[in-house]
Amino acid sequence: MKILKYLLFILASLLVNLETLNAATILGKAAIYTSSGIKTYPLVSGSKVTYEYESLIKITGGTLIADKGTVLEALDEGEQIAFQVEKGSIYFRILPDKVRVSFKTRQGEVFSPKVALASNTLITGRITVTDKDTIVEVSEGSLEALTPRGLVRINPGQKINLAQAEVVGAVPEELVGKTGTNETQCIPDCAV
């Protein structure tokens, strides 16, 4: 009888603290490549990690490669996984019909669109975060960026600096600016 009361007490304690037990959601796996081999760890929501080695991060519907020195925190935000990136470079490959991902930095936020276009079944690219700026490059598919100047779409072959909120890739090679000289980076005041 005493054992049954003890087991019921433990079961009741677990049920009361069930929310606390679920607080750290496992979002995927991180494989860290060191000189002594590969070590695999769970990617836990809310854990801030500094990657001292190049690391492969696998989530359902996506793969990321964090360069050496990258500092990020993965967060479960219900319908999407958010990566709070403090510094470093991340290469990404995302299947937008399987997962929604966002990258949050001091300069803005970049995310996969809510509705994936039928022609874009894959989003690939790179995000590089430094103390001064964030550069996002898209190789395939498209992303949306929430910048200080508003919502911007980044298409294949384009690069954007979130600090300036300007698309700096896919610009015609020679533009004639207001002064009549060839200027390649005179956005937005250029005339062709």
Image (cartoon, rainbow, N blue to C red):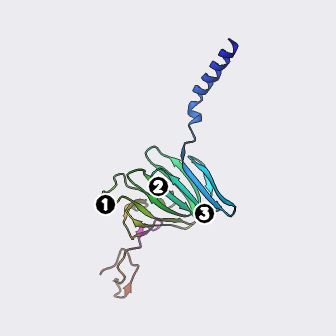
Q: Residue at coordinates 41% horizontally, 79% vertically from top-left?
A: 185
Q: Is residue 58 above or below residue 79?
A: below
Near-viewer residue (181 or 74): 74
Residue kind at label 3, given as amino acid type: Glu
- Give the labeled residue for mark 1: 119
- The structure residue drawn at horizontal position 31% and vertical position 60%, both measured from the top left corner, is 119
Residue 62 marker: 2
Upstream in sequence: badge 1 or badge 3: 3
Q: Secondary structure at mark 1?
A: loop
Q: Which residue is mark 3?
A: 54
Q: Are marks 2 and 1 in contact (CB under 8 Å)?
A: no
The label number, if any, that marks residue 80 in the structure image: none
| Picture coordinates of residue 109, whole percent (x, y) | 46, 57
Residue range (magenta):
159-169
- Furthest toward the bottom, the residue is 181
Could you tell me the amino acid type at mark 2? Gly
